[in-house]
Amino acid sequence: MHDDEYYKALGFKCGLEIHQRLATKHKLFCSCSATMKEEPALAKLERRQRAVAGELGKFDPSTSFESRKGRRFLYNIFKDTTCLVDIDEEPPHQLDEEALAFALEIASTFNTKVPDEIEPMRKEVVDGSDPSAFQRSMLIGYDGTVGIGGKSVPISSIFLEEESSGIEANTHEYVEYNVDRLGVPLIEIDTDPVIYSPKDAKEIALRIGMLLRLTGRVQRGIGSIRQDVNVSIREGTRVEIKGFQDIETMDVVIENEIERQRNLVDIKKELEKREAVVGKPVDVSGLFSDTQVKILRENAKNGGAVYAAKLTNFGGIVGREINPDRRLGSEMSDYAKMAGVKGLIHSDEDLKAYGFSGGELEGLHKELGMGKQDAFLMVSGPREICHRAIGLALKRAELSLDGVVPETRGIDSRRLVTKFLRPLPGGSRMYPETDTAPIEVDQQRFGQHLTRKVDYESVKKKLEDEIGNKQLADQMIRSPKLGLYNAVIEETDAAPPVVAAILLEKMKDIKRSGIEVDSINDETVIGVFERFANKEITKAAIEEILKALPKNPSEIGRIVREKRLERLSETQIEAIVKEMNMADRGQLMKTIMTKYRLNIDGEELNRVLSSMLSNMK
Amino acid sequence: MYSEAIENALGANGIKIGDSIRLKTTNGDFEGTLMPRPEAGDAGILILKLKSGYNIGVKYAPSAHIEKLSSPTETFSFPEAKTTAKRSLEDVTMLYTGGTIGSKVDYVTGGVHMLTKASELLYDVPELADIANIEARDLMHIASEDISYVEWQQIAAATADAFKRGARGVIITMGTDMMHYTAAALSFMLKNLPGPVAITGAQRSSDRGSSDAFMNLICSAYVAAKSNIGEVGTCMHEKSSDDSCAFINGTKVRKMHTSRRDAFRPVNGSATARVSYNGKIEYLSAYRKADATTDKISAETKFEPRVALVKIYPNSDPGILDYYLNKGYKGIILEGTGLGHAPVSTPHKEYNWLEEIKRACNSGVVVGMTSQCLYGRVHPMVYRNLRLIHDAGAVYCEDMLPEVAYVKLGWLLGNHDRDYSMEWLGRNMAGEITPRTEFEWFDA
């Protein structure tokens, strides 16, 4: 990480968009349950979507790109969580009042103003994630703030909108979605782009997340909160990084993104100097009819084609590293992949390693008219896909003459770098939702929601009282696990200090050991604590079960049986003590606990021993 | 329309809808494009489109400061679809009449308006140019619920004209609500069809990427250009999925759902053909084959509007027939219950229809009986009450849909005398009455 001066010199700017599902009973515009449950799909629908001329007749860059991909969309529909509204077969119902109330409370939490009249809008989406091809969204707060470390960060807008569908499968022919999640109320909180360091971005995201949880109005569990970050540097343009699941690494990802943008700006300058030009695709299949290059041979077997194109004066630059393990060529490859190829080959790679013969390369150079400082791109695959792929790769090559490309990017969670998802949506994809009326917030009905604030101090005091440990309580109030903690305390008799220690400390240890402990769903975790509270298992066994659950989801019973984690009863403990027949109490305890660590609670053993001892007296 | 106070303030500052403005109020400062006030909502609230694309409603107070920043620079009109006729493709005429298929969001008003040129549809669905040489003709711009027999006559005449001018098939786009009435009317009006007539529309307007209009148009184009059907029918989604349309004979189809895209279903019959998105046509039941000699086609478009469709229900007042008789009506279609019942043996004299039916028949009005069950066939003999109505002079209309019977009687009385009309009301003319009722027709 660098110091603030470094970011300032770059003109780095960043803004956050935090998306959080609300814990309402119903969806935003229909009466379906907003709680997803695991159930088999009732039916599957197939739909096609296309870009339509948007507002003022312009095609949105992101929507037309998606429809050029020409994919079909499949939708799994469910009994309790899907109705005709979700699948674009019935107009929306009235806005859910509970969702509006919760949204207004959140607006109050972030000190925003509320519009005199709320105008529901349609935001066009053609990635298929909404069967209606748009998402309903409305501005419900503006001009707000969030305080952090004595500073105040402006919250420009808060939106109330519909959640999109969850992806079930994504292939080059179709994308399959589950529409149970679609339409669940979602709140989006946007900061102004006034965050000037990656560390601050992370801190502010954590703070917003905490405040949302403290409202008590939000869903918990995997995927219920998502963070998007907009990043730009002075000489670049805005790039949106979508879907931070692990907020802990947010600063590293942003840091790497800054590095990528810096490198792209440098590349642009160099290409300008070199007067680089992007060429046209050429069918070079004939040059490789007898090739030993494995990828080309395999594709040729299925009647595939090979296309190549010259990049004049790009030599050495296509292979230049712009992020750890990522080159400019990787960006071009990402574009090509959208057409359905596995990747591309470029001249800055070790071509001999692919198996190209000297003759092949010579032929190719001749065919393309390659000069010394030139580079080439090559794609192979079924003819039509291949042609499209090289076109997309060349599009990206051309964009490198502009430097940073306005894009929506995802996260490679292994390398902690960003990767291309799609072009950044433009501003021309919103129009009014004409099937519902504008909403004037009734002061009488919603007054209490408009003024409700998060009571940080009293939540903190309650946690301190329950957990009995200031440090753990402080950790809990900031933790995404707060909701789960509250649910465990509410639904089971498990002792709060144990619950807090396991959720905050043990689970972190398990995660560090490489087990995906956060993938366990909340209901299962609650189930584990329930067994503990009912004295079916010991505290030590909780940890063992949590370690085993990610590989055996929802199978607590089986794990307990197979790992022999049943807690021993007082009578059983007494029998063991008698059988051991040891005089030294300390030695006895140690022996028993070594053997029965997971089945006997130490305190209970101590108690049994004491009572046996006093009975003997 | 905005309130007078707002209109005055806008006028005083020379601001028009669509202008970019700055607004300073006690609830904040805003910059955006001034939008018109939709019919719903408070006329005292200004609607601005912010830079983010979102609209916001701002309450106007005289203390507010309004300032014009700029006038709109761009106006957009849909580009015309440029198509060059391909010799290998058939000529198809598309008659545009209005309805949801032509609805577009008005980006200025935010409301839905009808598109202004039929050719905009061709722009939205470029695939059509590879299926047929389509000539789009603006016939009218009307919502289907506003269509009357006058429009049926115009559409029928235009269809016949299109064939005479060499079209192989005709596509008619229209609103969906009364599409099945139009389909029935054209089925009776158009004689000796030399090619297919596919009526289509949309349940979702074509300004949304998910609209059913696209596939409906594509499949209709396939029917019009490639099938040898010589009938009028609807061509709409077969299922909720976008994979095939059903072409259903215009006398056997009914809109059975308010909003689903597969709302159009065959009743007392099966679809004529299934047309897939990629153009495969699968014939599912017998149909009239096209008679390719175009000079034989005729449009018999006369229609007697003094025909009524009357529903029988508990406590229904038979006096309604007096009303129609007094107005000089020539035909009545009753939508009876079950096998074709109306209350005729009831102890409550005021609800007994028998005398009224008799009186209507005796005064020369043609009375037809259909069933509100929709599915199945009426029968004049099974119960005594049925026989009473039949003996009074009502024609039992077999398995004909009530709406179709209504259209048919209007057409019969428009073109023929009473006796002929009575005779043919209960006999098949265009596929509306089938001799057999197949099991699968009610096995959905």
Image (cartoon, rainbow, N blue to C red):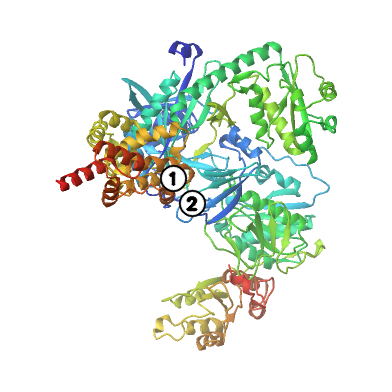
Tell me what residue is drawn at x 38 percent, y 42 percent.
A219
Is A231 on the left-hand or right-hand side of A389?
left
To which residue does mark 1 refer? A184
Tell me what residue is drawn at x 31 percent, y 41 percent.
A592
Q: Is residue B340 above or below residue B103?
A: below
How far is mark 2 from mark 1, CA to CA? 12 Å
Quarter of the image for residue B351 reads: bottom left
Q: Of discs 2 and 1, which sits in the foreground?
A: 1
Residue B354 picture location, percent across and down: 48, 84
Judge whether residue B383 can be spotted in this image: yes
Q: Is residue B63 above or below residue B128?
A: above
Check disc 2 and give the amino acid type.
Answer: Val
Tell me what residue is drawn at x 18 percent, y 44 percent.
A613
Q: How many marks?
A: 2
Describe the element under mark 1 as helix, strand or loop: loop
Q: Is residue A72 above or below residue B353?
A: above
To which residue does mark 2 refer? A85
Residue toward you, B330 or A439: A439
- Lower position in the chain sequence, tag 2 or tag 1: 2
Q: Is residue A602 above or below residue A157?
A: below
